[in-house]
Image: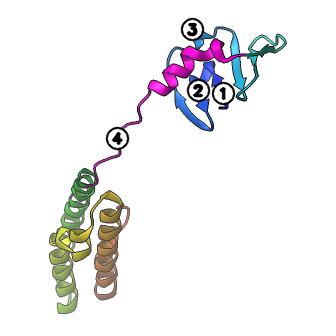
Amino acid sequence: MRVTIIPVDGVVGVDGAFKQVDGLTALFPGVHAIQWDGTAGHIEFTDGSPNVTLADSDVFAEALAAFHAIVPPPPPDPASEKVAVLAQARFVRETVLNRLTGIQVAGADAPTIAAIQAARLSLLNITADAGVVAATDGASTKTAVMAAWRTIAMTLSTAAPAAASVFVGLGM
């Protein structure tokens, strides 16, 4: 088992896996690092003193115990991630709808007005898009929402280029 301890950074590494561990500077005052290769090791000091050789791991047993006591957080709940992405999508949707509402359609031709109305309807239904509904977690939901946004924006920019500017500066 390889061990690296860097007290000033509050880090303990075991076989390449590193975790933050509190209280290392108090445990090892004046120590820059402790290195252990499984059978031997050394202590490096912050003041430039020569390294001290270690023959056993008792010196850092407490730090090692603290490392092993740290339990990683549970993985995020995919359903909760999806809810968060949908909330963000709804917020952005409302911003775009408000911008579309503010566009002057007086004097616009029928295809432009129809494109704006179609975009509004698509935006209102974006969370019902088949890809969004089928998504199971935050990442796939975001991908599906972004695909739906692009489709709406491209359709609008083709039919009503002036209206497509409502999407500028928005991101998910």
Majority secondary structure in the magenta region: helix
Q: Residue flagged by tag 4: what amino acid is it?
A: Pro
Q: Nearer the viewer, residue 119 or 9?
A: 9
* Residue linked to disc 4: 74
> Tag 3, which secondary structure?
helix
Residue that label 3 marks: 26
In the image, is residue 56 above or below residue 157? above
Q: Residue at horizontal 65%, vertical 28%?
A: 3
Q: Is 139 colored magenta in this rendering?
A: no
Residue ID at (22%, 64%): 93
Which residue is drawn at the image coordinates 33% and 65% (left, top)?
A: 140
Q: Are the residues at dot 1 and dot 2 in contact (C-beta closer than 8 Å)? A: yes
Above or below — where is 63 with respect to 127?
above
Kindly state the secondary structure of the residue where label 2 is placed. strand
Q: Cα distance, mark 1 to mark 2?
A: 6 Å
Q: CA distance from mark 4 to mark 1?
A: 25 Å
Could one spot residue 172 in this view of the protein? Answer: no
Label 1, secondary structure: give it: strand
| Image x and y of residue 78, in percent | 28, 54
Mark 2, residue position: 12
Left or right of 45? Residue 131 is: left
Mark 3 to mark 1 CA distance (whole Å): 17 Å
**Left or right: 100 in relation to 5:** left
Residue at the disc numbered 1? 4
Q: Spatial distance from mark 3 to mark 4, Cα to Cα? A: 29 Å
Q: In this view of the protein, which residue sits in the foreground, 142 or 61? A: 61
Which region is colored magenta? 56-78
10 Å crowding of disc 2: few (<14), some (14-19), many (20+): many
